[in-house]
Image: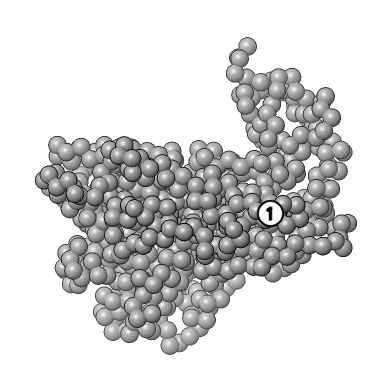
Amino acid sequence: MDQNKINLTIDNRPVSVDKGTTILDAAKACGIEIPTLCHINLKGTCVNNHPASCRICVVEVAGRRNLAPACATACMEGMEVHTSTMRVLKARRTVLELILSNHPHDCLVCPKSGNCELQNLAKKLKIHETPYEGGEKTTFAVEKTVSIVRDMNKCILCRRCETMCNDVQTVGAIGAMNRGFNTTIAPAFGQNLVDSECTYCGQCVAVCPVGALTEVDNTGRLIKDLANPEKIVIVQTAPAVRVAIGEEFGYKPGTIVTGKLVSALRQLGFNYVFDTDFAADLTIMEEGTELLGRLTKFLGGDKSVKLPILTSCCPAWVNFFEHQFPDMLDLPSTARSPQQMFGSIAKTYWAEKMGIEREKIVVVSIMPCLAKKYESARDEFKVNGNPDVDYSLSTRELAALIKEANIDFTSLEDADFDTPLGESTGASVIFGATGGVMEAALRTAYEVHTGKTLDKVDFTQVRGLEGVREASVDMNGFELKVGIAHGLGNARRMLEDIRSGKSQYHAIEIMACPGGCVGGGGQPLHHGNVEVIEARRKAVYEEDKNKPLRKSHENPYIQKLYEEYLGKPLSEKAHALLHTHYFNKTK
């Protein structure tokens, strides 16, 4: 008999599971569905929320007087579990009716309508009346930031957002406040999100089962701009979008729909359809050159060089270190994110080539990330008040707009991006996955530093979904040590090692979201299914593998940009257009 196994029955079905397995996971393993609201578990990414606060998942356990929450009750040897007795069904209905008694009934106009777990559960349990009406309801002011809308009147206190913000991301921007009827999830001391340490990563939005946390919707603004004949509206789309947006139209997670995405954007009326991947290649040229510059000084004996260099592509991560580690602002690369590099080049180099005034151009980005909305609004990315990127839409927002425009996405013919800002290499598309920025940088840095051709471009040691990974690369006798982290909790541990002098890395890539951009807060909702994130991650590497060019410095349009306009990486002009600086935002 295996001492690590537990044998029990669930609905009279024999089940054998590992010790410590919850009833919920045991039931799922044998195909028995138990409804949940507060529970979420992204295995392999440290996201595990089971506060047993909603009690929707209660089951009956033989010999136990009270019903047990399946998400927080461990299986025991010989246990007899029943998941759908009349007592259980009555309890679930009563719990749900009580939750609905303090919930707004504005489903028709709620941003989460049609994709709301509470709404779906009410339908499944056939709740057509709310018998506990007539009492007082909570009333909280709705807060709208540049990225996130927070409506605590719709909060069901599942505390998923709190788990993401505090336990996974270790940001600590929100938490439970007050007691009894006035209990809410909010920033400390009753602040608003804008006054907190919120990074706008959007992971709270991604896990919220209802409409308490949603993204700011910019589709209405886009429709007005597309209808304005005085404006030239151009769009850039991030690498992670093309491997996820298909889910909104019935495709399996990880299906690559790049060509259909371009066609849909053209049908919506954009004047030009470009690719953020172009700017990702540009980012590698600037960030890679910066890395090699620091390493050259370090190897020359300059002990004042700031190492490890930290990537700066993720705006939520940038926000995090500005708030939490202001003593280390000289470590990150000064290179802007690909989104902001694209906007800057579009409104200077491209605008001059096309003979279009900057003020007539509207740059829209389609991003997997809600922090991109915040990033595009930062003052340092504006020229005389005119932003380099006017605004950003999430993957979900674009999918909704395509549906609103009656575009049959599945029947679209594949189309190509416009040139020159639509041409890219395989190195750029892997920016969408954790480890991708580092791998893209290594492909270029190795060849520039050694002068040798890199025949095998796949640095598989930096890939995966482990929260922290590391690798060593032989750079012609010099061992370059790199680290990779996704999730801000993992980033914190890396930064604390740097602060304490324990870190041995020369370069570190950090992405805020689980899995990187493929698991971004603006992506189609995965509802706790880590297999979805893994499918998207694999898809970006598949797209990379099929590209004719796979190193950023080989992009002929990037080469032409430097020849015609920028001069060389880190030139005075490149620094002015493609680099930034950071701020102490300690609260």
Residue at (25% x, 43% y) in the render: 506
Asked which quadrant contains residue 358, the reply is: bottom left
Q: Residue at x 18, y 41 (%)?
A: 475
Residue 120 appears in the picture as rendered: no
- Please state, as top left, top right, bottom left or bottom right, where the N terminus lies in the image: top right
- Left or right relative to 42: residue 537: left
Q: Which residue lies under the disc numbered 1? A: 178
**Is 492 above or below relative to 552?**
above
**Which class describes the residues within 10 Å of circle 1: few (<14), some (14-19), or many (20+)?**
few
Residue at x-position 38% and y-position 84%: 360
Which residue is at the far top?
A: 1
x%, y% of residue 379? 39, 72
Given residues 268 and 235, the one toward you in this image is: 235
Position of 341 relative to 254 (above/below): below
The answer to whether 8 is drawn above or below residue 387 in the figure is above
Amino acid carrying label 1: it is Asn
Residue 342 % position (x, y): 33, 68
